[in-house]
Amino acid sequence: MAADPSRTLREAEKLVGQRSTNGYEQIAALLADLRKALAGSEQSGLAEQQARKLKAENPTLHRLTRELRGKGFVPK
């Protein structure tokens, strides 16, 4: 995951397109894992960036926002 974070980012993009509760849970978990994998590296903020991007692109997906907030990506 740390070697190629773009795969994880693409997966998150694909999952948001599915518009499912399970998909939103998976996105939050993937981004949390990515954040952990990249901690201390030059790309350490990549997971947060992706979370903000997905929220901005999908402002009406409240379940997605809730899942991201649950993993500490989106402030209340």
Image: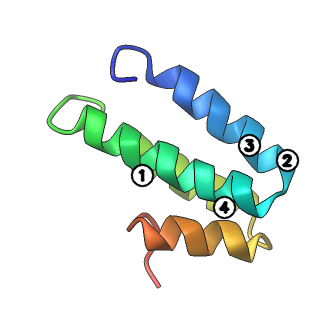
Three-letter amino acid code at the position of disc 2? Gln
4 vs 45, nearest the viewer: 4
Q: Is residue 44 visible?
A: no
> For the point 67% across and 57% down, which residue is it?
24
Residue beneath disc 4: 56
Residue 60 sits in which quadrant?
A: bottom right
Front position among marks 4 and 3: 3
Residue placed farthest to the top in the image?
Answer: 3
Residue at the far left: name it.
40
In the displayed structure, would residue 70 be above or below residue 28? below
Instruction: Give the Cα distance between marks 3 and 2.
Output: 5 Å
Residue hosting label 2: 18
Give the residue at mark 3.
15
Toward the front, the furthest residue is: 22
Dot 2 or dot 4: first in sequence order is 2
| For the residues bearing labels 3 and 2, Cβ distance under 8 angstroms | yes
Q: Amino acid at mark 1?
A: Glu
Q: Residue at x 70, y 39 (%)?
A: 13
Q: Earlier in the sequence, mark 4 or mark 3?
A: 3
Of residues 35 and 58, which is closer to you in this image? Answer: 35
Q: Which residue is mark 1?
A: 48
Can the viewer see residue 51? yes
- In the rendered structure, are the residues bearing label 4 and label 3 in contact, judged by CB atoms less than 8 Å apart? no
